[in-house]
Amino acid sequence: MPQQVTRLAVVFGILILALVLARSQLVPKTFGQAGHYRAAAVTEIAAAKIHYAGHEACAACHEDIAKTRSAGRHRNVACEVCHGPAADHVAAPTDVHPSAPKQRGRCPQCHGYDSARPTGFPQIDPVTHNPVRPCISCHQPHAPETPREPEACGACHGSIARTHAVSAHALIGCTRCHETDRRHKTTPLLIRPSKPASRAFCAGCHARDAGSPKEIPRVDVTTHGERYVCWQCHYPHFPEAK
Amino acid sequence: MDPRFQTLQEVLQQVKGYIYPNEVELHWGLLVVVYPYLTGLVAGAFILASLERVFNVREVQPTYRLSLLTALAFLIVAPLPLLAHLGHPLRSFEIFLTPNLRSAMAMFGFVYAWYLMVVLLLEIWFDYRQDLVLWSRRESGPRKWLHRLLTLGATDLSEASLRFDRNAGKLITLIGIPSAFLLHGYVGFIFGSVKANPWWSSVLIPVVFLFSAIVSGIALVLLLYMFTSLVRRVEIDMTCADKLSSLLLYALIVDFSLEVLDFIHRLYESEESIKILSQMISAKLFLSLVVLQALLGTVVPILLLGLLSPAFRSRGLVEVPDELRRWAYVGAAVLIQIGIFSTRWNVVIGGQLFSKSLRGLTVYKMELTGLEGFFVSAALLILPFVVLYFLIKVLPPWQEGETAAQAGLAEVA
């Protein structure tokens, strides 16, 4: 056998031996028993201290609050989301008391304005919305309702209101285009506002023969994009958008 | 203000349209651009070396050993950007200790180890063994011991033994070509298999990566060959430079055709992402894609090499003095390096600039300092040349060395 082969065999043999040795020393004993992970990790994690009690445990003592919450808009927000982990409180109710977020910082984590949040989700600007006063002075956190009907559409439709406010349509009020039943303010998902259903609505200002001020852009509504309602191509809250 | 928030605020001002909140900041930055660039150079340099060995392209023989050492130097540095990007470099060995056969990224550890240990180091060892033995006999001091150590004790220089070296080298190169394809094809595979990303998800990406790798590797070796000849005050072998530039031109044409094919395919397919991708090209990637990658990095070098290199006519389409041709080759090779780096940039950064909503674009703000910053990446791009310098010191790749070794062999005989 050529000398090279034997020498290389020795070198590769040492490397493979080193790998086998390293594996035997460094790979945890229970690795791979149940998948590509250390099986003992499961029992270690299971043995870790449990911090959360679960809302059923809270309801066992605080029945009245649980009842209020289950009927309100926060019914899917678990108690410990606001009050923090409560397992210690369940174990020793008089010795350990969970926290109650009475400051303004907590609620805006969900209700502060963020354009990524769905339209209609109650959102406020924490800087301008009744500054300094704690949220719970007006809102009942276990079954929150708006203290009074929202005054402006922007209270819920913040993203649209902000866009609309800087658009060429800024001076046109929301209800000019959307017929809105009063009940939409209290039951927004059940009673929906309307949208213009025909081209004639926009044509009221934008048709060639419309009686609106002459600065307003005109189109021939008989030929322009004939198969569509206007807002299928033009975004009415910001008509400048291409 | 916290500097991170400041950066975020600056970035937010340049965000266009609608993007999801977790898409504002890019997760793969400059270091991930450097990584495929470096591995591409490894694969390219190796494939150039294999041309001489397997396909008997005699003209490029002066660059054979230089290409092998270049591939090795870049291969040693190639994983460093990834390690710097991920952090916790000591955990990287877990890939070998607890191999995860279902992870493409983990399996790359084995592709890399195979390529380094079985292909590149072995090929270099078999090629240099005779010289190592002769050097260790003639030299003194630490170099003698270093070269002796590198022979691994295999000091037999009989004709049969040398023939075995040659045959083993050839066999390894044969295995090495698909391995080099695997090494860089894999990098393209990682991007091409991200099916949620329309900019990456394409079966052509691994092939495009491979050919751009060959282009960048040949261009780099051409540059290094010219530079080292200049430093060593040795005349450049123009037959070799001409052949290299012809090969470079062929590879560049194939690479460009593939990219154009990919482009036309995307246009014809015209998936829902086409609008945002064309917006991205015109708004965010115009400089790096249209100007640097396509125009300066591909079209200009194709014209330069097509006119001056002897690819189409033995004296070139336009006959110019050697000196001017050399400069043109250097210019083309430098432009190609810029172009290929832009290609990597456009793939890695471009793939993260548009929103998954296909309705908005974000922006990449490169940092200067810090682990993900410009300086670290620049250092990682310079490091392979430092490694190459030391490799050349230990294993001189020059033909004169080989001739001297032959003379030494004759003496021994």
Image (spheres, helix red, strand yellow):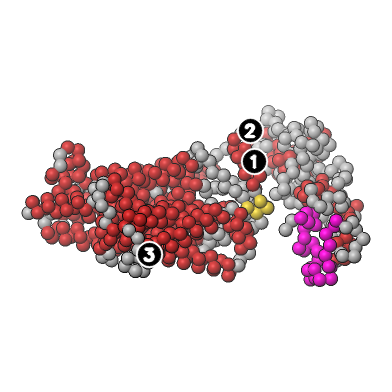
Magenta segment includes A50: no
Find disc 1 in the rendering and name its residue: B9
Q: Chain of mark 2?
A: B
Labels 3 and 2 touching (C-beta < 8 A): no
| Residue B410 point in image, percent of width and height | 9, 54
| Residues packed near mark 2 inside 10 Å, few (<14), some (14 to 19) or many (20 plus) | few
Q: Chain of mark 3?
A: B
Give the residue displayed 16% in from the left and 61% down from the top.
B163
Query: Secondary structure beneath disc 2?
Result: loop
Q: Chain of mark 1?
A: B
Viewed as shown, does residue A68 lie left or right of A6? right
Instruction: Give whichever of discs 3 and 2 has the lower sequence position.
Output: 2
Distance Cα–Cα, label 1 vs label 2: 10 Å
Instruction: Give whichever of discs 1 and 2 has the lower sequence position.
Output: 2
Labels 1 and 2 touching (C-beta < 8 A): yes
Find disc 2 in the rendering and name its residue: B1
| Observer-nearest of A33 and A190 | A190
Give the residue displayed 20% in from the left and 40% down from the top.
B143
Of tags 1 and 3, the one toward the viewer is: 3
Q: Which quadrant would residue A61 be assigned to in this image? A: top right
Q: Which mark is residue B206?
A: none
* Quadrant for the N terminus of chain B in the image: top right
Q: Which mark is residue B318?
A: 3
Residue range in magenta is A215-240
Q: Is residue B270 above or below residue B367?
A: below
Of tags 3 and 2, the one toward the viewer is: 3
| Residue A2 point in image, percent of width and height | 16, 57
